[in-house]
Amino acid sequence: MVGFALFGAGRIGALHAANIAASRPRARLACVYDTNADAAAAIAARHDARVAASVEAALADPDVDAVLIASSTSTHVELITAAAHAGKAILCEKPIDLDISRVERCRSAIAGSGVALQLGFNRRYDRSHRAVRDAVRAGQIGALEQLIITSRDPGPPPLPYLAVSGGIFRDMTIHDFDLARFILGDDPVTQLYASGSIMVEPRLRELDDVDTAMVVMRTGSGALVHINNSRRAVYGYDQRVEAFGAAGMVQSDNLRASTLTRSDAQATDVREPLLNFFTERYRQAYLDELGEFIDVVEGHRQPTAGFEDGRCALILANAAGESLRSGNSVQVRFD
Ligand SMILES: NC(=O)c1ccc[n+]([C@@H]2O[C@H](COP(=O)([O-])OP(=O)(O)OC[C@H]3O[C@@H](n4cnc5c(N)ncnc54)[C@H](O)[C@@H]3O)[C@@H](O)[C@H]2O)c1
């Protein structure tokens, strides 16, 4: 049984804690650490775990084989480094950090530690998105020519969250950059153009951020990728992927609570609303992500998303920021 220390008992930490608890007998939550002791205590009590007094105490706990880092983004590099030096396997939430030079330094600091590190790019584990990737990689649509990713949130997060989020590309689009890389495989992005507007939250002007964005990328083979994001879709969490190729097209659609359709005197084929936001839409994906990580800790496989994927997604996010500011397309290099 893999014993977990959870760092960060906030929104996503609570979800991961519940998933670890649900993974018994393969895993159990041994301890929780959060700088907010009340938050840690609440999750520990819910799942019969201990509250750790410090990061060091959690890493020294003999019941801890692996750490799940779900704390604020600015703490990830420090916690990854400490866990790697303690020889613990790591599942870390995205992004690794907002600053690429800190990510590079972290890479050097943990090189040679030999610990497994999986990054929490949960969309790779969505069964429909993964089926798109599998179809593309199996050649079912011939050579890939266009990849279109639509990712729209139901509503913007609170302003204090946005203020430290790193901007739409590093906070939100980073998932889509990673999903694009996952589907593209060994056909890297070489060029990127991004545009953005404030259409939803006027106060973003003070933060030099946007809430509505489009990115167009070109790969080495000439395939074109389009990502579109909005912080507000009034009809719910809109998550769709379409891959178009020489021999056909595959799509991953939104999910609903059921496949019910209703027809009456006013309308026909009325469907259920979309599953609202990430904790519902990606519920199974988070479970599958954790299941893969437990396999990794047990030595059965390598992680699907690792440190390098986090680094490359951040490089794309930074390129999008640069393109937005300059109004020009940007050449992308991953070295
Ligand atoms: N993969 C996803 O779908 C997804 C979804 C949401 C958030 N995230 C990522 O997860 C991370 C947390 O996001 P959230 O929405 O849960 O934030 P949150 O603010 O709800 O929770 C963060 C928690 O970290 C704690 N914390 C701060 N510093 C700490 C430290 N040094 N040690 C331990 N705990 C510390 C805070 O007290 C807080 O309880 C972010 O990096 C975010 O980008 C990923």
Image (tube, rainbow, N blue to C red):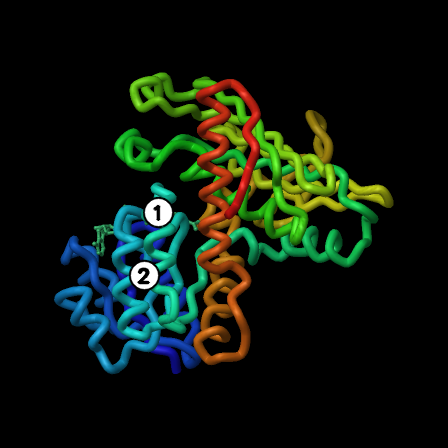
Q: Residue 169, position in %: x, y?
A: 45, 34
- Disc 1: CA contacts within 10 A as few (<14), some (14-19) or many (>=20): many
**Element class at badge 1:** loop
Q: Residue 273, position in %: x, y?
A: 57, 39
At a point 29% along the width and 36% down the height, the residue shown is 164
- In the rendered image, which quarter is residue 198 located in? top left
- In the rendered image, which quarter is residue 180 located in? top right
**Element class at badge 2:** helix
Q: Is residue 111 visible?
A: yes
The tally of labels here is 2
Q: Amino acid at mark 1?
A: Asp
| 198 sits left or right of 38 in the view | right
Q: Nearer the viewer, residue 95 or 25?
A: 95
Q: Nearer the viewer, residue 124 or 323?
A: 323
Q: Is mark 1 within 8 Å of ligand 1?
A: no
Q: Amino acid at mark 2?
A: Ala
Give the labeled residue for mark 1.
Answer: 97
| 129 sits left or right of 94 in the view | right
Q: Is residue 228 visible?
A: no
Give the labeled residue for mark 2.
Answer: 109
Proximity of marks 2 and 1: CB atoms separated by less than 8 Å: no
At a point 52% along the width and 34% down the height, the residue shown is 152
Question: Where 2 sits versus 260, above or below?
Answer: below
Q: Nearer the viewer, residue 334 or 184?
A: 334
| 140 sits left or right of 265 in the view | right
